[in-house]
Amino acid sequence: MDNTSDSDDAQIEISKSTLVRDALVFQLKLLIDGLRDLVLIPVSLIGTVVSLMNPGKNAGTAFYDIVAVGRETEQQINLFEAADRVLPEAEQSQSSDLDNLVRDVEGYVRREFESERFSAARERLEKALASLDGRKHKSDA
């Protein structure tokens, strides 16, 4: 009795040695990617501060140079290369994109921030802060 289904027939056969190799390489790449991220976190924050202190035509260059290096190293690491062995190209391109999610959330936050409901709350907050600031200046005198 054969227990294989049609979907099993469509899968590409991978040898155990290839699987072990891919798993070990993946672990190594995860380690390298994690170390890269640990380095990029403080370096990108420093780059942001440097970029903010450098106004004008070259504003942001330090930060964006760091982002470009991060992108390049990400492509070199190619963390999920092993998936190319078993996933058809159609399935590979259907993966969700974090940048799209960030854009969607940012759009929502902007729309809410610009809405009248938030505008009224923002005005009340600004009045309260101005009132506190006025009291602070009176107590300093």
Image (cartoon, rainbow, N blue to C red):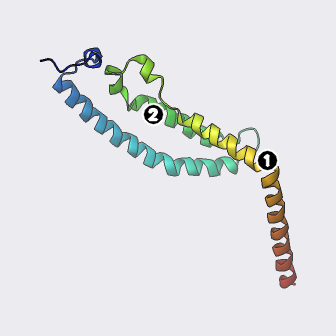
- Left or right of 77, for residue 53: right
Quadrant (top left/top right/bottom left/bottom right) for the C terminus: bottom right
Which of the two residues, 76 or 89, is positioned nearer the viewer here?
89
Residue type at mark 2: give it. Thr
- The mark that comes first in sequence, 2 or 1, is 2
What residue is drawn where x is 30% and y is 34%? 26
What is the spatial separation of the Cα atoms under label 2 and label 1, in whole angstroms? 38 Å
Name the residue beneath numbered marker 2: 73
User: Is 88 rendered above or below residue 71?
Assistant: above
Picture quadrant where residue 65 is located? top right
| Residue 105 image offset from top left, x and y in percent | 63, 42
| Circle 1: element type | helix
Which of the two residues, 102 or 60, is positioned nearer the viewer here?
102
What residue is drawn where x is 39% and y is 40%? 33
Name the residue beneath numbered marker 1: 114
Which of the two residues, 52 or 125, is positioned nearer the viewer here?
125
Residue type at mark 1: give it. Glu
Picture quadrant where residue 90 is located? top left
Which residue extends farthest front? 1
User: Is 1 rendered above or below residue 72?
Assistant: above
Quadrant (top left/top right/bottom left/bottom right) for the N terminus: top left
What residue is drawn where x is 78% and y is 54%? 118
User: Is 70 rendered above or below residue 75?
Assistant: below
